[in-house]
Image (cartoon, rainbow, N blue to C red):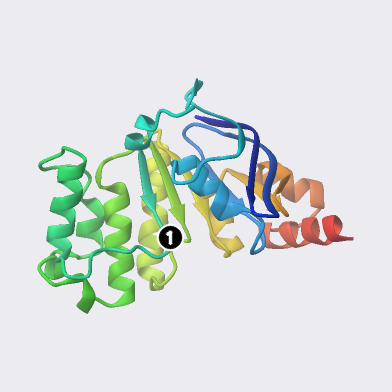
């Protein structure tokens, strides 16, 4: 689905990404993990076309992206904290997004139903609770049935039932052939939904492979302990 080759990114003297080679497999859920400052956010922004790499290549379905950003229409993005226009209602936000995507109606509204958002669609976003805004954030990411979903800390602020609903939705999309990239600090959550994991540390890929391969390599019983073991090994 997505391949990066030797991605480099520097902000001033800070070398954030140092030669990132990653393959994101189609119809799989891939977790991108690492401590704060590892380069996760920068890598995500580059994949989304929100930031340009200083050097290196990105290919989407085998086609180099270069300066053509049209591939972004095939991506659904759920930021950790969505910055929606506060004066809009949730319904107006959906209408606005549909107009931007030239999609007057329809789409995947399953999360609107499953999160019971119909009751709040006519309320201004500024009056909604943080958890409800996060549900709207999730619903907009899935609305256009994208080929690739990029979800940044998607369950942050959600109650356990809503979190379970969203994870079920992610797995259902994978079953439909969608590709999903997820970042999260909750390793148990990633282990529940991810096929693959990319572990970044200091701007370098320290591991890329399946969750089971990582647990086998570190001889740990779960992903959280496997990542902790990798961090200790790399720092030592």
Residue drawn at x 57%, y 65% is 186
Residue 41 lies, in percent from the top left, at 54, 54
Compared to residue 78, the image places residue 35 above or below, namely below
Q: Position of residue 178 (x, y in %)?
A: 40, 36
- Total number of numbered discs in the rendering: 1
Q: Quadrant of the C terminus?
A: bottom right
**Can you tell which quarter of the image residue 201 is in?**
bottom right
Mark 1 surroundings: few (<14), some (14-19) or many (≥20) residues within 10 A? many
Inspect this view and state whether residue 221 appears.
no
Asked if 56 appears above or below 174 in the picture, the reply is above
> Where 228 sits versus 148, above or below?
below
Q: Which residue does the numbered mark 1 point to in the structure image?
A: 154
SS assignment at label 1 = loop
In the image, 11: left or right of 50?
right
Does residue 175 appear in this view? yes
Q: Where is residue 155 in the image (x, y as percent from the top left)?
A: 43, 64
Q: Nearer the viewer, residue 129 or 168?
A: 129
Question: Residue furthest toward the front?
Answer: 12
Q: Which residue is drawn at 85% across and 57% down?
A: 233
Residue at the extreme top of the image, as rendered: 63
Residue 74 drawn above or below residue 42: above
| Residue 60 pos. (x, y %) | 48, 28
Residue found at x 27% / y 55%: 139
Q: Residue at the spot x=23%, y=51% of the render? A: 110
Q: In which quarter of the image is residue 205?
A: top right
The reply, left or right, for residue 72 in relation to residue 230 is left
């Amino acid at each position: 689905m997505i391949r990066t080759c030797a991605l480099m990114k520097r902000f001033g003297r800070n070398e954030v990404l140092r030669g990132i080679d990653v393959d994101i497999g189609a119809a799989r859920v891939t977790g991108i993990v690492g401590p704060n400052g590892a380069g996760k956010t920068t890598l995500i922004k580059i994949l989304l076309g929100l930031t340009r790499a200083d050097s290196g290549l990105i290919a989407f379905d085998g086609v180099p992206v270069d300066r053509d950003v049209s591939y972004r229409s095939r991506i659904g993005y759920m930021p950790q904290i969505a910055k929606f226009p506060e004066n809009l209602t949730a319904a107006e936000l959906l209408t606005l997004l549909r107009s931007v995507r030239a999609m007057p109606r329809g789409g995947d509204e399953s999360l609107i139903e499953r999160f019971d958002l119909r009751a709040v669609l006519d309320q201004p976003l500024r009056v909604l609770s943080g958890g409800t805004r996060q549900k709207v954030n999730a619903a907009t990411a899935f609305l256009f049935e994208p080929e690739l979903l990029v979800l940044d800390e998607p369950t942050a602020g959600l109650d356990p039932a809503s979190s379970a609903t969203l994870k079920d939705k992610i797995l259902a999309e994978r079953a439909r052939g969608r590709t999903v990239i997820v970042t999260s600090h909750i390793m148990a959550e990633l282990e529940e939904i991810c096929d693959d994991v990319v572990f970044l540390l200091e701007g370098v890929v320290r591991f890329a492979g399946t969750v089971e391969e990582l647990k086998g390599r570190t001889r740990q019983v779960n992903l959280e302990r496997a990542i902790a073991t990798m961090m200790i090994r790399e720092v030592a």
